Amino acid sequence: MSLVRSSPRTVAERLKALAEVYEHGQASEVIDRTLDKLLAHEAEVTRAQLQQLRADLAQFEEQYGLPSDEFYRRFQAGETDDRMDYVEWASLVQMVHNLERRLRLLVGEDGE
């Protein structure tokens, strides 16, 4: 099995083909089980990443005595300076938001 990553276009084309297989009712039980396992694995990896990032956020919250959501609101509004800690903290908040959205997509809970 090759570990070379496909280009996004190639992956998108392959996913489109898979969707068409499903739309025509031709998906096999093997495909269903494989997709379930893949999504569950990716969700678990994402949860582990979130756990680590949330621990990192907790350190900033303790250090500065401020919840991350309030800090991020202030950061976005330009109410903080640009010290390296704040830039890192804001990046962590963004990463958590992105991973939370990814997890919702993986487990089928995204409302979009």
Image (spheres, rainbow, N blue to C red):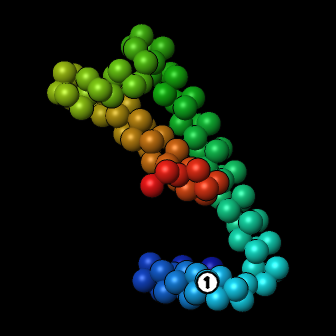
Outermost residue to the top: 65
84 sits to left or right of 22 = left
Circle 1: element type: helix
Q: Please tell me which residue lies in front, 67 or 52.
A: 67
19 sits to left or right of 63 = right
Query: What is the x, y in percent for residue 67?
Result: 43, 18
Query: What is the x, y in percent for residue 33?
Result: 80, 72
Q: Please tell me which residue lies in front, 111 or 78.
A: 111
Query: Which residue is depicted at the point 57% across and 29% down?
Result: 55
- Quadrant of the drawing holding the N terminus: bottom right
Q: Please tell me which residue lies in front, 63 or 8.
A: 8
Query: What is the x, y in percent for residue 90?
Result: 34, 34
92 sits to left or right of 56 = left
Query: What is the x, y in percent for residue 39?
Result: 68, 62
Relative to residue 36, is residue 57 depicted above or below?
Answer: above
- Quadrant of the drawing holding the C terminus: bottom left
Task: Note whether residue 61 is visible.
Answer: yes
Q: Quadrant of residue 93?
A: top left
Query: Which residue is depicted at the point 44% across and 78% down?
Result: 8
Task: Note whether residue 88 is visible.
Answer: no
- The residue to which callout 1 is attached is 23
Relative to residue 39, is residue 2 depicted above or below?
Answer: below
